[in-house]
Image (tube, rainbow, N blue to C red):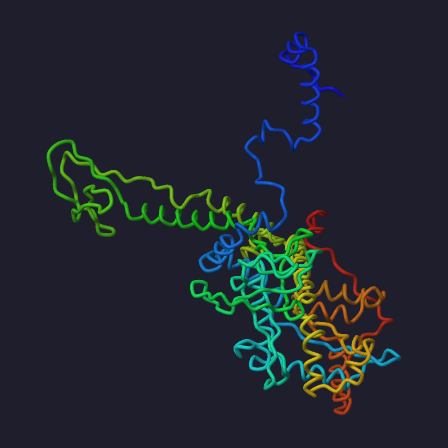
Amino acid sequence: MMPSLTFIDRAIAWAFPRWGVARAAYRAQFRSYEAARQDRMGDWYPVQNAPPETTDAPHRSLIRARTRDLERNGDVTEGVLDALIRNIIGSGYGLEAQVESARGLPLDMINDRIEAVWQAWCLAENCDITGEHSFNELLEMVLRRWEIDGEVFILKLTDPLGYIPLKLQVLEPDMLAEDIFQCGSNYVFGGVEVDRYMRPVAYHFRPDPMPYLKSMEVVRIPESDVIHIFTKKRPHQIRGMPDMTVSMERNRNIQEYITSELQAARTAAATPGFVTRQRGTGAAIGRVGKDTKTGQVVEQIQSNTLTYLGPDEDVKFPQPGRPNAGAPTFLSMILRLIGMSRGLSYETVTRDLSKTNYSSHRGGQLEDRKTYLRQQKKLIAKFCDRVYEQWFLEAAVLSGKLLLPSFFADERARKRYSLHRWSTPGWQWVDPVKEIQAVERKLALGVSTMAEICGEQGKDWYEVLRERKREIEASRAMGIELPWFNPQMELTPIPPDEDEKEAKGE
């Protein structure tokens, strides 16, 4: 369908029919994609369509420096980061070994031994090459650097004198040798050596952490000994960019805006009034001096005091307009945008619950938990699982701390020994009564399991059963009968929430 013709179109078509047809066709082509129009977006020309390293490499260092500055000086950035760490890691992850027999029954003795060795290795002096951080503290550091720097590296180191011959070293991206471009037949992008499929095969690091003291020495470490954690958004992306890049400018602007508002309020509070004179000189109200910046004559007045003036003098008290009445609404909008960019609600970013009810608060929390769960799964898959399955078990068996028959000889046996899950931090219920009743219904209807329910609370279901058994045995020995959940009992109906009551006019 041809677009409607303007007067210019008709004039060109009458004089030059061929040009008229071409003009109309050109306009029709751009109308098919509104995003390609140049009248409203004529100044929007991204740099180029290019591979990730072409677009990211020139700006990666500067963006990383800016996000680190916001980490040091930005209270909003630190608040968002703390919310992520608090909910994704919490007090840390616990290992639940799940080695089973051929009949599918848990091998408690083996599982208990694996968990005991793992807990011992997770101590700071056993797992960290610096001896300063436990495994869960390293986990928190990894997440923090992932969020701020966009990527983080964990190296596998061998320590023959350690609890087991395995220790971890966390490295920042600054230590990559970014001035190496080829190694043999493989290309090197930003210190990452890749094959022809853009698959990492090795990493090139400079051992000197001080950028201004870097030597020419480069250490090539194979990919099997390095864990590289970053958010991969493009198929050929091999280096990471901070997830907070998209909101970085707003984070910076909001810090400057708040600082400006505070300065304006301080200036207004420090300027009580102005003296106007018609002619001549009069007595000063306060101490006379000059402003060091402007050179203007100013007078300092003591708090809550005022000297009466002469007949030809007048004092005017300005209306400063500070604090800005529109600032809270404006700040709320910007904070919502910042939270939206990280998949978090406004309430989580600001801890402001003054404008929420039960349903909205619960809905926001449930959406936030999707963000936390997504990051948890990535962190577990990229870091925890690989450390446990590929590095820890092998080192523990080699050291004799674990006796796992056929671990190295039989690949199927090795996979069976590697079965496990992680108990992650749970989240408190918004309304415990309602949610406990929902748990009852899920278990009674068979749509959930104890493992799932306990996992949501950060507990090991098997440990819960064993503790329950010990409590029952102890109570019966004392002649006390503990109440049990009866599957035949009538479930308590779930009352309507507050929003439903409001809708019904109750």
| Residue closer to the observer: 492 or 461 | 461
Which residue occupies the extreme bottom position in the image? 477
Which residue occupies the extreme right position in the image? 103
Tell whether 192 sits left or right of 261: right
Residue 352 visible, this angle: yes
Picture residue at 59% right of the left edge, 61% below the top? 84
| Residue closer to the observer: 122 or 346 | 122
Above-or-below relation of 357 to 156: above
Which residue occupies the extreme top position in the image? 15
Q: Quadrant of residue 193?
A: bottom right
Q: Quadrant of residue 37?
A: top right
Q: Give how far across and how far down residue 358 sits, in percent.
A: 65, 56
Q: Quadrant of residue 278?
A: top left
Above-or-below relation of 327 to 478: above
Tell whether 380 sits left or right of 56: right
Residue 430 visible, this angle: no
Which residue occupies the extreme front position in the image? 184
Above-or-below relation of 42 to 93: above
Picture residue at 73% right of the left edge, 79% below the top? 463
Q: Give how far across and how far down residue 248 sits, in percent.
A: 52, 50
Q: Give how far across and how far down residue 270 sits, in percent.
A: 29, 48
Where the N terminus falls, by quadrant? top right
Picture residue at 55% right of the left edge, 60% below the top? 81
Q: Give how far across and how far down residue 354 sits, in percent.
A: 55, 53
